[in-house]
Amino acid sequence: MAKLEITLRGDFDTVVNGVTEKILETSMSAELEDSSNFRSKDARCAVRVIERYSFAGGNRVSLTLTFFAVKGDDRIHASAITSGGSQAVFLKMNTWGEETFLEKAENAFKPYQ
């Protein structure tokens, strides 16, 4: 598992949609598996789960994106966590696919830093 936490700036919907679309464009096998949106008073949270085939690892890898913001604060807290990619039974080996997928998320975040 690889993880990145970062603070972004911009309109919440623009950031969530922009990051998601950018990641989906990076791989022909990438698909948005599911999404969730939550709002409570002045707080918003969006979760996106994207999956793709990793040629390096020969398996599928998932990326979970979580975005959180509070109205009146121009900061959006974002988390990207990858999972999958290992082919071993008892210990985690061959995490290239996860690390590569996380790099794609990091690049998608850059316009909003």
Image (tube, rainbow, N blue to C red):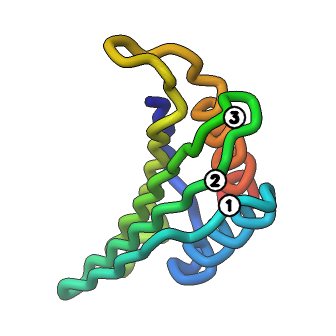
**68 or 48, which is in the foreground?**
48
Could you tell me how far apart the alpha carbons at marks 2 and 3 are, in whole angstroms? Answer: 11 Å
Name the residue located 57 percent from the left edge and 45 percent from the top edge.
60
Location of residue 10 with respect to 99 vertically, above or below: below
Location of mark 2 (residue): 52
Relative side of 25 to 2, left or right: right
Location of mark 3 (residue): 100
- Whichever of labels 1 and 3 marks the residue nearer the N terminus, that label is 1
Secondary structure type for disc 1: loop
Discs 1, 3 touching: Cβ within 8 Å:
no
Say what amino acid the circle numbered 1 marks. Ala
For marks 2 and 3, give the one nearer the viewer: 2
**78 or 55, which is in the foreground?**
55
Discs 2, 1 touching: Cβ within 8 Å:
yes
**99 or 57, which is in the foreground?**
57
Name the residue located 74 percent from the left edge and 29 percent from the top edge.
56
